Amino acid sequence: MIKCIIIDDEELAQEILVSHLKKIPDVEILGVFDNAVDAMKTLNTNEANLVFCDIQMPDMSGITFLKSLRKPPLFVFVTGDPSYAIEGYELNVLDYILKPFGIDRLVKTIEKARAFMNMENNKTADRDFLIIKDRSNIIISPYNEVYFIKGDKDYVLIETQDKKYHVWKKLIDMEETLSTAKQFVRVHKSYIVNLDFAKRVEGNVIKMRGSITDIPIGAQYRAELYRRLGLNGND
C-alpha cells in the first residue's frame, strides 16, 4: 500500500491530485496540507512513504523542506515551473511532474514508486546489487561493479565500473544499506570501499586495482579493516 501526503498551497492543485489519486488502486492519502510545516507532524509518524509536494510555497519551499528532512520518504515534486527539474533530480527525488497533468502521468509515478519500494523491501543478506536513483532513472548496480563510495556532507559519490553517480544521501545511510555485504567496509570518515577491488595496504592508504583512486584509511577504522582482512593490528 502506498501511503502519501500532498503539500500544495493551491486549493485547485490539491483537489486535482486528490481526485486522481483516489482512482488509483492501493493508494491511501494520509493528509493534504497547504504548507510544509503543517505536514511535518504526519511525516514524523513515519507512516507516509510518498510525498507529492509543490516547490514554490510561502514560508518554506518544497526544496528547502526536502533538504531539512533527515530520512525523507520518496518525494515527487509537482510544479508548474520546469526550471527546478535539474535541482530536483540532484536531490534524488523519485519524479518531477509538471502542471497541468492527467491521471495517466500520475499512474506512471505511482508505478515507479511501487517498483522502487518493492526493490527496497526485498533487501536480504544475499542481495548483490545496489539501487541508485539517478535523476529520473533507477539504476541497478551489481556489487561487483561498485568500486567505492565517498561521502561529502549530504551527498555521496558512488564510483562504479560504468560511471560516477552523485546521490543525495549520507554516507552513514549507505553504510547501513551495505551492512550485510561482506565486501564493503567503512575505512575512513568519508569512504566505504569494496575490498574486492583492493590490491594492498600501504601505511594509511589502500592501493586499489587498475586505475581506481587510492583510498585513505582513518585511524578509528583501521581495526575493523584489519579484522575484515583476517589480520590483527600488529600484522
Image (cartoon, rainbow, N blue to C red):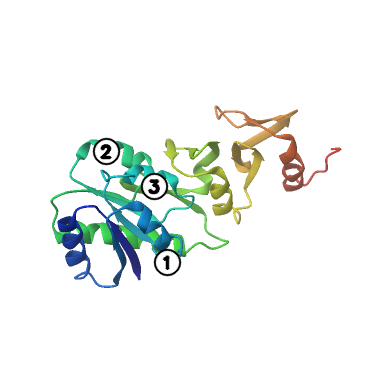
Q: Nearer the viewer, residue 99 or 116?
A: 99
Question: Cα distance, mark 1 to mark 3?
Answer: 17 Å
Identify the mark at residue 47; answer none if there is no mark.
1
Q: Residue 89 in the image: x percent, y percent?
A: 33, 42
Mark 1 and mark 2 lie on one chain; the one further toward the N terminus is 1
Please report contact status of discs 2 and 3: CB closer than 8 Å, yes or no. no
Screen quadrant of the C terminus:
top right
Q: Is residue 111 visible?
A: no
Amino acid type of the residue tagged 3 in the rendering: Leu
Q: Residue 90 in the image: x percent, y percent?
A: 36, 39
Amino acid type of the residue tagged 2 in the rendering: Tyr
Label 2 crowd (10 A; few <14 / some 14-19 / many >=20)? some
Please report contact status of discs 1 and 3: CB closer than 8 Å, yes or no. no
Q: Residue 142 in the image: x percent, y percent?
A: 48, 49
Identify the mark at residue 66; answer none if there is no mark.
3
Label 1 crowd (10 A; few <14 / some 14-19 / many >=20)? some
Residue occupying image coordinates x 35% and y 59%: 50
Q: Is residue 215 left or right of residue 115?
A: right
Question: Cα distance, mark 2 to mark 3?
Answer: 13 Å
Q: Nearer the viewer, residue 90 or 15?
A: 15
Under circle 3, the secondary element is helix
Mark 2 and mark 3 lie on one chain; the one further toward the N terminus is 3
Amino acid type of the residue tagged 1 in the rendering: Glu
Relative to 54, is 5 above or below?
below
Under circle 1, the secondary element is loop
Identify the mark at residue 106; answer none if there is no mark.
none
